[in-house]
Amino acid sequence: MTSRVRGNGGFTLLEVIVAMALFAAGIVAISRLFTGSLQLCAGARDASAGAIYARQRMEEALLAPVPAEGVEQGDFGEGYRWKLETSLVPPEEEKPYDEIRMRVTVRWEDGGDERVVDLSATRWRWKETGEGDPAMGSGRKPTGSEPGSGDSGGNDGDYLRSPTLRRRR
């Protein structure tokens, strides 16, 4: 009597196919994680560049001796466009200074979506008296010119507000 002994140590074809399918699904999931991570890094890089460009343009506007009222537009290159809006705030009462609001908006395209960074600041300019000397009033700075003062939570004065990043569709 001869009997054939069948080996129990191997895998069936079905087991190998299932294992390969699970392995392939794991590889696909990991590659999607890497791709998503790269896209998030690129988006963060673009948002940082937009905020830096906005801050740069705002600082240039704040350093101008007499800011011109109106709208200026330009291009930083690399798809980043900027717009500076400068307006004189009408005074509610007679003050020895003018209040000038400035707003910088930087826009760029990100995968078909428009991204926007907005910065705004307020600047005070002392008015001139008849003799050409600045009207100093009491010699104190306008209300809200110190950090943490004013009605807007300490974000007024020649201090920049935090940049706002928006996605437009």
Image (cartoon, grey):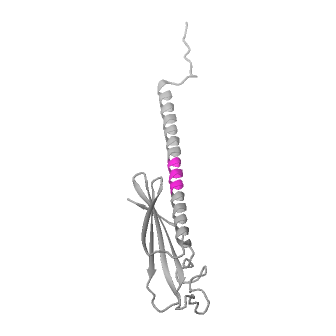
Q: Does the magenta run of residues contain 32? A: no
The answer to whether residue 160 of the structure is visible from this angle is no
Give the number of callouts. Answer: 0
* Residue stretch rendered in magenta on the structure: 36-46
Q: Residue at x 51, y 32 (%)?
A: 19
Q: Does the magenta run of residues contain 39? A: yes
* Image quarter of the N terminus: top right
Seen in the image, is 136 located left or right of residue 104?
right
* Above-or-below relation of 55 to 8: below
Q: Residue at x 49, y 35 (%)?
A: 24
* Above-or-below relation of 56 to 160: above
Q: Residue at x 42, y 51 (%)?
A: 111
Splitting the image into 4 quarters, where does residue 63 fall? bottom right
The answer to whether residue 2 of the structure is visible from this angle is yes
Outermost top residue:
1
Indicate the position of residue 29 as horizontal and vertical percent values.
50, 42
Indicate the position of residue 151 as horizontal and vertical percent values.
53, 83
Q: Residue at x 47, y 29 (%)?
A: 17
Viewer-closest of 14 and 37? 37
Seen in the image, is 84 located left or right of residue 144?
left
* Image quarter of the C terminus: bottom left
Indicate the position of residue 53 as horizontal and vertical percent values.
52, 61
Splitting the image into 4 quarters, where does residue 82 fall? bottom left
Viewer-closest of 125 and 2? 125
Prevailing secondary structure of the magenta residues: helix
Indicate the position of residue 137 as horizontal and vertical percent values.
58, 92
